[in-house]
Amino acid sequence: MPGVRVKVSFGRSETVGLVLALSDEKERSTAKLKAISAALETRSVIHTTDISLLQWASDYYAHPIGEVIFSALPSLLRQGEPAERRGVEHWRLTCRGARQEPDQLTRAPRQAALLRLLMDHPEGLSASTINERQDNWRPSMRKLAEKEWVVREQRPALLLPAAGARDKAPTLNAEQQAALASLCTGLGHFGVSLLDGVTGSGKTEVYLGLIARVLACGEQALVLVPEIGLTPQLLDRFRRRFPVPMAVLHSGLSDRERLDAWLAARDGEAAIVIGTRSAVFTPLARPGVIILDEEHDASFKQQDGFRYSARDVAVKRAQLENIPVLLGSATPSLETLHNARLGRYSHLRLSERAGNARHPELAVLDVRKQPMNSGLSLALVNAMRRHLDADGQVLLFLNRRGYAPTLLCHDCGWVAKCRRCDAHMTLFAGRKRLRCHHCGSERPADPACPECRGSELRPVGAGTERLEEALQGLFPGIGMVRIDRDTTRRKGAMQALLDSVHDGSARILVGTQMLAKGHHFPEVTLVGMVDVDQGLFSADFRATERMAQLITQVAGRAGRAQRPGQVLIQTHHPDHPLLQRLLREGYAAFAHAALEERRQANLPPFSYLALLRAEAVDGELPLRFLRQARELAEAMQLRGVQLLGPIPAPMERRAGRVRAQLLLQANRRVDLHRLLDPWLQQLETDKLGRKVRWSVDVDPQEMF
Ligand code: ADP
Ligand code: ZN
Ligand code: ZN
C-alpha cells in the first residue's frame, strides 16, 4: 500500500524505504530491482495527499524524491522505529522535594542546581530541556531520585492548555473584523489570502479568530512561523486562548519528541500544530487551514540540500488539501504582493495599530562628518539620554555581531583574512579571538602584525560587542542587554535576557536582527538603527527589498503601547532613494516602486530563475563543469530559457572551495521546468560532475 514503510536490503545492510505507488509494469529489468524483505506496518504512515505533495516538491525543486521524503519524515521513522507514541521523559519535584532547601546542599552543588531548576518549573521539565540547562545532569538526578525528591514520568509530547484563567479574545476593530469575515467565508476550499498589516496592527488576533472557527468545525490548524518567531510568549498566547492540545515542531526537539508531536498531528490529537519551516510537511488528520506568519521571512527558504520554500510548499499543499492558506506580514515579499495585485491572492489590509498605539516617527540621522564613538553619533547618544530620562527603553539595532568586522595593522595596512574564504575575520570575545562567519574557522587574535611585527593592531568598525562596551562607558549604571547569536546560544539565555527587558531592569537593548521580529516591548520608545549603509549597496537584487523589510520591522518595535515611538536611522547616504521613499511614503510605496524596477529589469516575480552552483577544491573544475552544463543545455535547443554565465560566485572562495554559478532565466515557468528535468539527468551521468559538488536551486533567494 502506498505510504507503508518497507525494508529492502542494500549490500550488506538493510534500508528503510517508503512505498510511493504500486505498478503493474513488468518491462523493467528485474536485475535492477530489489526485493522488499519486510513491511514495517500494515497502515500507511502518511496520507495520500502527503505523498502527492512530496512528489510535487521533488519535481518542482528538481530534488531526488528519496531526499525529499528524508527531510519530511521524523528521523526515528526513517530508522525503522514503530510509528507509535511513547511519551517523553520528564522530571518533576515530589512534595518532599518541594520542601527542601537547595542552599543546604552545599556539598552537592549540581544537585542543588537541579533542585532550583525544578523549583522554578513546578510542572516539570523534559529531559531535553534539562540537557540544555545543565551538562551531565543524570548522575545528580539519580541521587535526587533515590532520596525521593524527584520523579521521572513519561508524558505525551503535547503542549496542553494553560492552567488557570483563559484569555478572552479582545473585541476586534473594524479592519480586523472585515479581514476575519472574509477569511471565514474562505474556509472549506482552497484560496490564498495575504494579511498585509503594519507591525502591531493585530494580525495575530486575526489568526487566533480564524483558528477558533476552524477548531469549532473540528478541524486542525497548521501555523508556521520563522525560526526566531517561535517564542515562549507566542506559545503562551495560544495556550491561554484555546483549551486544546498543541503540537510544537522545531529544530530543538529530541528525535522522540519530534516523532511524538508528529504522530499527534497526524492522528488528529493535536488540534493546533505550530512549527518552523519543515513543519509544512507535517501530516494532518483533518486539515482546516494553514497560516504562515511573517511570510517574507528568509528562514522559510531552506538554503542547502533540499532547497524548498515553505511558503510556496504551503500554498501548493493548501491546493492539494482544498483548504485556505493565509500569508501574514507587515512587509510582504514582492512575489506575494505581485500575486495579490494580479488577483490570484485576496489582499486584506490592517492599516492601523491595534489598541491605542500610534505609528512611530521615522527620521534619518546624517552622520557624514560627524564625530563617532564606536559607531554612535552624538545626536543619537543625546536622543538616547532624552528617552532614558523620560523612563523609556531604548533599542539599538546593528546587524553585525562580534566586536569588530576586522583587525587592521595601523603600521602596514595588513588585515586579518580568513585562510579558507575570501572574507575578513571578525574580531570577537572582547579582542581575544578571530572568527570567520562564513566557514566558522577560529583562531586567537594576533598579538602582533604577522607582516611587519608591528604592535598597532586596531579593530576596525563596530559590532554588537563593541557597541555594548561603548554604551557601558556612556551610560554607566544603566541596565543593558545584548541579544545576538553569541549571547543566546544556551537555550534559557534568550528568555532570561527578554525577561530583564520586560521587568524593566534592562533599559538599553542592543541586538542584531534577532531583535527585529515578533517581540513586543511596550516600553521601548526609541529605536536607533546604528548602520544601514551595508544594505543599500549590494550585488544581490533582493538586497534593497530585505533592507526595507528589516528597517520597517525594527522600526515597528518602537512605541507599541501607549507611549509614542521614535526611530532614528544613522546613514552616510541620507538622500538614498530607497531610504527616502521608505521614510516619506512607507513600505507599500517602496514595494510599488521596487516592483516597477523588477519589471523593467525582467527580474522575479516577472521572470523565473534557477541557479546551478558548483564548487571544488580544484579551482579550475567548477567553471569547466558549468561551461559544459551550458553547452548541454544549448544542445537541447529548448526555447524560452536564457543562460547567464557561468561566472565565479560573488564570494569566490569559501571554506577552502572555489565556487561558481550558472543562472537560468525564463519568462514562463513551464519553459524552465521543461529544461531542468532532462538536463539534470544528463548532468547526473557527467564525468566532470562527479568531481565537483553541484546543486540546483529553483527560485533561489540568495545569489551566492
Ligand atoms: P501583530 O501580529 O500585527 O504584530 P498583535 O496581534 O500581536 O499584532 O497585536 C499587537 C498588540 O495589540 C497585542 O498586544 C494585542 O494583544 C493587541 N491587540 C490586537 N488586537 C487588539 C484589539 N482589537 N483590541 C485591543 N488590543 C488588541
Ligand atoms: Zn603590519
Ligand atoms: Zn572562512
Image (cartoon, rainbow, N blue to C red):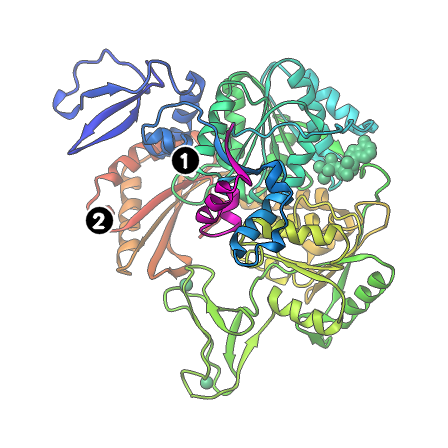
Inter-mark Cα distance, 1 to 2: 27 Å
Along the viewing direction, whichever of 288 and 629 lies nearer the viewer: 288
* Quadrant of the rendered image containing residue 203: top right
Q: Amino acid at mark 1?
A: Gly
**What SS does tag 2 mark?**
helix
Residue 668 visible somewhere in the drawing? no
Q: In the rendered view, tell whether residue 339 sits above or below residue 96.
A: above
Check the image and name the residue furthest to the left. 31
Q: Crowding near pointer 1: few (<14 within 10 Å), some, many (20+)?
A: some
Q: Residue at x 56, y 70 (%)?
A: 404
| Magenta range | 129-155
Tag 2 or tag 1, which sits nearer the N-term? 1
- At 73% from the left and 71% from the top, the residue drawn is 377
Judging by the rendered image, the residue that carries numbered circle 2 is 688
Q: Is residue 173 visible?
A: yes
**Residue 334 x/y as whole percent:** 61, 40
Mark 2 vs ligand 3: CB under 8 Å? no
